[in-house]
Amino acid sequence: MSGGPVDATTTDAWKALTERRAGFEPDLRTWFAEDPGRASRFTFEAADLHVDLSKDLVDDALLADLLALAEQVGLEERRDAMLAGEHINVTEDRAVLHTALRLPADASLTVDGTDVVPAVHETLAKMYAFADKVRSGEWKGVTGERIRTVVNIGIGGSDLGPVMAYEALEPFRHPEIECRFISNIDPTDAGMTLKGLDPATTLFVVSSKTFSTLETLTNARLARSWLLDALGGDVDRADAVRKHFVAVSTALDKVEAFGIDPENAFGFWDWVGGRYSVDSAIGTTLAIAIGPEGFAEFLGGFHAIDKHFAETPLAQNVPALMGLLNVWYVNFLDAQTHAVLPYSQLLHRFPAYLQQLTMESNGKSVRWDGTPVSTDTGEVFWGEPGTNGQHAFYQLIHQGTRVIPADFIAFANPAYPLTDTDAGDDDVDVHELFLANFFAQTRALAFGKTAEEVRAEGTAEEIVNARVFSGNRPTTSIMAPSLTPGVLGQLIALYEHITFTQGVVWGIDSFDQWGVELGKQLALQISPAVSGDEDVAKQQDSSTQSLIAYYREKRK
Ligand code: F6P
């Protein structure tokens, strides 16, 4: 990459946005009252996603400035460079090609002199064949029994995507195979997850891009010892590992060194970032759960949004618009966090998944040429499914002092259409009651409640102010017909490209993660002190020394 990133703050568009901010007084009540076309003008379609930005704090003039900013920082050029396989992950000198993982088999994409699409589809075919064998019972454990439980061992991107999607796609799962997930090096995780499992019917999928992550290798060894101990002395140990362990990694030599048959290993490539890898072989556990057809549909969903992002003019390009709005909120309205609120219990791990995607990508203080950023970057993403969040933290979103842009996500059709037949005279479709909350929340946040309206309800004057809702709290509503594998792929790709858009404006490398390294190095350095090495303990600062001493005194 020559020339370095454009400093967004030096652009004319940034200056225009700064001026606009100075006189900005959002008034969603008036904007809607005076503009009957607002909802339709600010609602966009991307594949199956119906995205309403009309309750965001945006008007036509602001949108024009944001689009000018996109142009002046070269968003489209950078997007095209990513899609073409240029090494836009500058600090690791790598292409960024998660989008190649979901290209159709008849596509072609040459990266560093090689067409990557045939290899992607070869790996998919191998993974699908394996998934089919496990699903049909053809794959047998060492004692000849079929597999009933699949345990994915991985962390970060090698865990969050698979577990989030496994939870989200519960209605599509194989009915007789349960998947479990071990990620944390806290031995409680492995201990609890393995509890009650029958080793003869358990298969481990060790998922690690690098196959060198301390947590994953430790847990894989724990699992191997657990398996061999529990199977007892009569089984051939190498055969047991071969039949109960498979691996997913870019480091197939290390997989073999661990004792896993390379035949049972599924590869991927350094141009797939860990947090962008659920659609690679890292999705093996998911492919076993939802089957090859489901997984192919999942990939199709990603690809539909990739096409939208690549081909739609920015003025209608949903990920670009959402990313630009996030820049507006972070850099001009001082938003520090962003809530993601799925009105779908199935998406209960989606906010956690997005935390890695967005915060590991955009939590940076230098740009991709090493110069310091000149603006704030990545916001804190967080959330919980509605309506649970309503009874926990929505108070702060409604009446707190901070701007918290929030994405509300809902589906027209429920996975479990249940009717409350005991509610009174009429039966209640519970999904409708649920969605009434979804619609009500964004309305309350946008339009609030004035003091006059509160008084008109007969409220005592001394508590009127406490009951006023200011409104003008920005929300985006994302709806889709149902939560299918394809729609889940679309949602993930949507957020991938939102994250990319923000990273381009900020001029950062959204695909490295150097910030996780120091803690990893120090853990290895401190480890002997925790086990009693006094010399290493003495090298620590006084706080760390005293904490280790407390631990050693209390540990039974
Ligand atoms: O936390 C850093 C990180 O490198 C993530 O980016 C990655 O998803 C995770 O560790 C796991 O890495 P691996 O798949 O190589 O075990």
Image: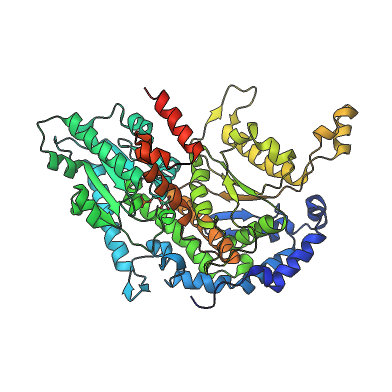
| Residue at 60% across, 57% down | 377
The front one of 139 and 421 is 139
Q: Is residue 10 left or right of residue 23?
A: left
Point out residue 23 in the picture as x, y percentages from the top left corner.
Answer: 83, 60
| Residue 405 picture location, percent across and down | 66, 49
Judging depth in this view, the residue of 186 and 270 nearest the camera is 186
State which quarter of the image contains the C terminus.
Answer: top left
Q: Position of residue 493 (x, y in %)?
A: 49, 57
Does residue 307 appear in this view? yes
Residue 182 seen from this side: no
Name the image quarter holding residue 163.
top left
Q: Which residue is drawn at the image coordinates 39% and 41% (left, top)? A: 526
Count of marks, rendered view: 0
Could you say where residue 550 lies in the image, as x and y percent from the top left? 45, 28
Asked whether, in this view, residue 84 is left or right of residue 150, the answer is: right
Residue 409 horizontal side relative to residue 256, left or right = right
The quadrant holding residue 533 is top left
Is 316 rendered above or below residue 437? below
